[in-house]
Image: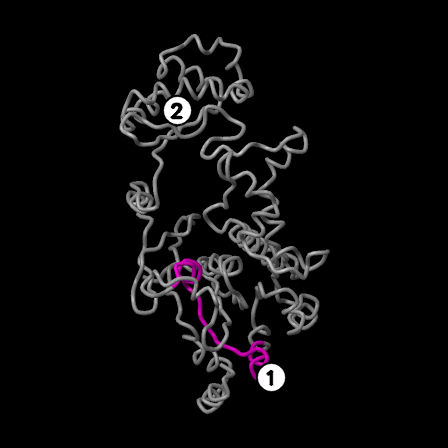
Amino acid sequence: MSLPQLPLSGITVVSLEQAVAAPYATRQLADLGARVIKVERPGDGDFARRYDTTVHGHSSYFVWLNRSKESLTLDLKAPRGREILDRLLDGADVFVQNLAPGAADRLGLDTGTLTGRFPRLVPCTISGYGTTGPWADRKSYDLLVQCQTGLVSLTGTAEEPARVGISVADIAAGMYAYSGVLTALYTRATTGRAHPVEVSLFEALAEWMGQPAYYTRHGGTQPPRLGAQHATIAPYGTFTAADGKDVLFSIQNEREWAALCADFLGRPELTGDPRFATSSDRVAHREEVNAIVAERIARSGAAEILKNLEAIGIACADVNDVTAFLDHPVLAARDRWREVAVPGATVQALLPPADLAGLPARMDPVPAVGEHTEKILAELGHSRADIDSLRADAVV
């Protein structure tokens, strides 16, 4: 029995990508069935391949971001290499690039040039701070953008700020590039017009800073850094149980506060205490609230506390490390892990989070550098002699 066709089957994406943001966008397009041709430098390829060597000798970043793609090596500064890229773009639907500032312009791969030459192509540019404006020429990396948007000033403890522990600016930009490309493809299908897409890391993460931005502009001060506690809700954070394990829980409304007071703290009279009457009151008296909660939690083990909180409808959780996350019972029970091939080995990878009923997930191999070069060149009509010549001249 043949498998159902994936939603983006028949769509070809050509990507000049590196690091995280663009590869994350194109991997998600590949997840949906798009053919993604990843153009890499001859030799070493995408520099993210060398971020680390922890996954059977491969980079953990690269393995995460590049499954289900084809790798083509090209020297784009060589005329024959550029000619090959142009032939690919002539038959492609989407072009994604996150090259260094000015590099796309120097190669004639800027949006204006591409839309003039390839009217059906959807060009997608991912930059640090936008392709116009006073910072258009600045290099940008994830932590720089975390700092520029103020995110680092919100993360950490009162004593010390901290970066978010994942590449959150890159991920945000990759998500908006992905959704922007999907929107442009839909618009092209319904109107016939291909709209270029542009996303910057800075503006993507700026959008995610919306709540603290409104809070700061209209409240006069920014939310404080409180470690694992919530800046604008209390009680909401981690507390240490009698067995030394941390548990986290949150109170989202007055009904939950009343249940916590009566059925967990054993102090129903607290619901009438004007210090704790509303969420804002509890935040203002956070130290008193936390002291009451901490004293109660310190009297029981973590498992008992979680069981009691769940029984009265309070959201709560263990504070897992990454190893515990990998063994999480929800991932196991919902069968979320799949085998994915990497050069020389296989790894466990999570299914894409959006399940499309009746459609299988695409979980194809992570490519070696240039693994598909000869196949793609043959599709473009190059003979064996042509390919050998291109290799001899280091064009591919």
Q: CA distance from mark 2 to mark 1?
A: 64 Å
Q: Earlier in the sequence, mark 2 or mark 1?
A: 1
- Residue that appears at 46% across and 57% down: 32
- Residue that appears at 40% across and 48% down: 357
Residue range corresponding to the magenta coloring? 59-85
What is the three-letter code of the residue carrying label 1?
Pro
Read off the residue under disc 2.
314
Looking at the picture, how far across and down is residue 389, in whole percent?
Answer: 48, 90
The answer to which quarter of the image holds residue 101 is bottom right
Residue 325 drawn above or below residue 309: below
Looking at the picture, how far across and down is residue 386, in whole percent?
Answer: 49, 89
- Residue that appears at 41% across and 10% down: 268
In the rendered image, residue 175 lying in the magenta stretch gets the answer no
Query: Please, what secondary structure does the residue beneath circle 2 have?
Result: loop
Read off the residue under disc 1.
79
Query: Dot 1, how many residues are within 10 Å of its Cα: few (below 14), some (14-19), or many (20+)?
Result: few
In the rendered image, residue 71 lying in the magenta stretch gets the answer yes
